[in-house]
Image: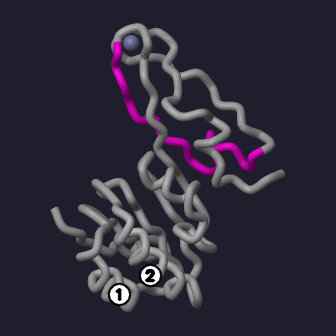
Amino acid sequence: MDFSYRVEKKDGWDCVYISGKINEDSESQLIDMGQHLEKKVIINFSGIKMVNSCGVRAWISFIREAQKSREIQFEECTPEIVSQVNMIPNFLGSAKIKSVYAEYGCEHCGHSAWRIFERGKDLPENSGSISVSDFNCEKCGQKMEMEEIEDEFFGFLQAG
Ligand SMILES: [Zn+2]
């Protein structure tokens, strides 16, 4: 599926739901999207299936332009988006992260699941306060482990 987006107005924010792939073909849609956003923007990544390196470049030029006159938040970042943000800080730019999904696996039965961390709830406030509660497998009830090292996964948090 190619890249697409839709915008919903909510409490003075433009909530932008993006989906599909961010790749070399997404550039013109990202430019188009940038021209249709108000001053306060929440970008929801839950529908993004993949990002490649050309897509990352297109995204960085989008965010660089978009953030100039806007307040931007990222919401429901998939594990792939979180790793892009951690590897390439320009992917986030000056945007703030509102919520992320982490992938968890159960060693006991092999089940895997995504768990959401939300700012103001269970997302650590800064990199000095990372302590996440246990998460039990919905299949067998055993404790699940995050697939990434917690300190690395939460690398996007500010030091504090
Ligand atoms: Zn299990």
- Where, quadrant-wise, is the N terminus in this rendering? bottom left
Left or right: residue 6 versus residue 157 is left
The residue positioned 59% from the left and 78% from the top of the image is 71
Disc number placed over residue 51 in the picture, else none: none
The kind of secondary structure the magenta stretch mainly shows is loop
* Label 2 neighbour load within 10 Å: few <14, some 14-19, many 20+: many
Label 1 and label 2: CA atoms lie apart by 6 Å
**Looking at this view, is 8 or 107 the one in front?**
107
In which quadrant of this rendering is ligand 1 seen? Answer: top left
In the rendered structure, which amino acid carries the disc numbered 2?
A: Phe
Front residue of 48/133: it is 48
Which residue in the structure is indicated by mark 2?
A: 62
Give the magenta range: 110-127
- Does the magenta-highlighted stretch encompass residue 126? yes
Residue at image x 58%, y 55%? Answer: 86
Mark 1 closeness class: few <14, some 14–19, many ≥20 residues within 10 Å? some
Q: Residue furthest right?
A: 160
Image height check: is 135 above or below 43? above
Rendering colour mode: one colour
Q: Which residue is mark 1?
A: 31
**In terms of secondary structure, where does tag 1 sit?**
helix
84 left or right, relative to 18: right
Query: x, y percentage for residue 27?
Result: 31, 81
Whether the magenta-drawn stretch holds residue 5 is answered as: no
